Image (cartoon, grey):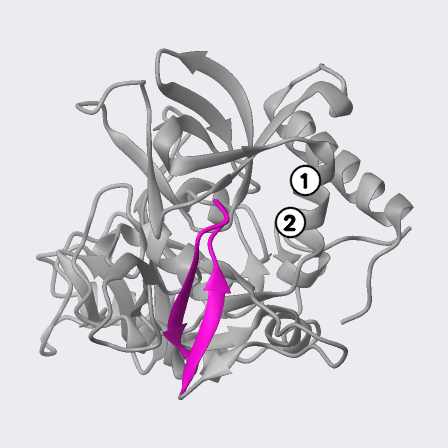
Amino acid sequence: MTQSKPHMKKKTIIMLAAAIAASACITTSAQTRRMAVTGLSEVNLREEPDYTAEMGTQALMGTVVEITGEKDYWRQVTTPEPYSAWCTELGLTEMKHDRLAAYIAAPKYICTSLHSSVRRGASANSEQICDLSSGDLVRIVMTEGKNQKPSIKKGWAEVMLPSGTKGWTPENDLADFTSWAQAFRTKESPEAIIATAKSLLGVPYLWGGASSKGVDCSGFTRLVWFMNGRLIPRNASQQAAIGREIIMQADHAVTPDSNKIKAEMLKRIKHLKPGDLIFFGTPETFFKKGSITHVGIYLGSGKFIHSSHFVRISSLIPGEEDYYDNSYRLIKAQRLFSWTGEGITPVIKSPAYFLQEE
């Protein structure tokens, strides 16, 4: 791979810090900001600096974050989405400006398997260093000598964790991150979104979960889009504000026990297409502000996939098998495909993952 120019490295760090600062209302200089990279398969981010505090989300290994606060061994961090929460220092590798620039520029693998591991030797019998989840990033270790290439041994790829620890991971569980991200630069496919979503069937529901070990409803949709090369906001209410809204003619006066509910639901889904995000909640009225409480991905024919108890497929149509009891709360749908407005960023264009040219 070609080496990046120094001015590109500097610009990328400034862009990243500025992007996070703009979202988090931080005013300190880009050069003095404390930056770090997450170093566990998923780092649990909590709302308060306490193990008993509610988990707000998770950050996958290799995520660049800004440290914005500190209390004992806890660090308040802001992720690229952005999302601000707390984790312990043990889940982070803090990096100064030049080291972070080198990390972002370094060639990496992305874990494309739901679960994998990093081992001390190129063997399944070797001691495990850590586990990996879908979407985790590890650096590629290159061979020494004139003609450098990725170090591979008997189907195992040599990798480096953000901390600098080296190990081995099954080659088939990884993809070259740059090539992977570039493939999604222009490619948008509802079929790919649905295939990724279905690969997570059976993954348990976890409040605040955003990894292949456990997901809440919006963590599920966020992970699905990330594994298709797109960054979208973390929470359902934020996701409901991006993309193109699909007009839904709904009569919210129809109750779930009404004999009109089936016709009502068929009317609401009339203009939906596979891959659309669908949202459930309370509609806005003249007297009360509406709220979004759940999100899923529409599959077509009245079916959708979502994380509720576990990732599963449910029906929006009363009387059908696997009918979702809260279907009558369907209030909104957004189409993210071909959307060029704010709220969706191709991973290849994010300064948190790649150096950006002017």
Residue toward you, 17 or 286: 17
- The kind of secondary structure element at disc 1 is helix
Q: Is residue 105 above or below residue 227?
A: above
Identify the residue shown where x is 22% and y is 42%.
207
**Answer yes or no: do the residues labelled 2 and 1 have beta carbons within 8 Å?**
yes
Q: Residue 304 falls in which quadrant of the image?
A: bottom left
Q: Quadrant of the N terminus?
A: bottom right
Task: Quickly name the residue at label 1.
Answer: 99
Q: Is residue 217 left or right of residue 341?
A: left
Q: Is residue 10 above or below residue 18?
A: below
Q: Residue 285 falls in which quadrant of the image?
A: top left
Q: Which residues are magenta?
A: 155-170
Residue 154's disc number = none
Is 166 covered by the magenta stretch?
A: yes
Within 10 Å of disc 2 (Cα), the crowding (few <14, some 14-19, many 20+) is many
The answer to whether one can see residue 152 in this image is yes
In the rendered image, residue 171, in percent from the top left (x then y), is placed at: 43, 81
Identify the residue shown where x is 36% and y is 26%.
288
* Residue kind at label 1, given as amino acid type: Arg
In the rendered image, residue 275, in percent from the top left (x then y), is placed at: 45, 73
Residue 103's disc number = 2
Identify the residue shown where x is 30% and y is 73%.
266
* Residue kind at label 2, given as amino acid type: Tyr
Total count of labels:
2
The answer to whether one can see residue 240 in this image is no
Q: Is residue 270 above or below residue 23?
A: below
Q: Is residue 19 above or below residue 189?
A: above
- The kind of secondary structure element at disc 2 is helix
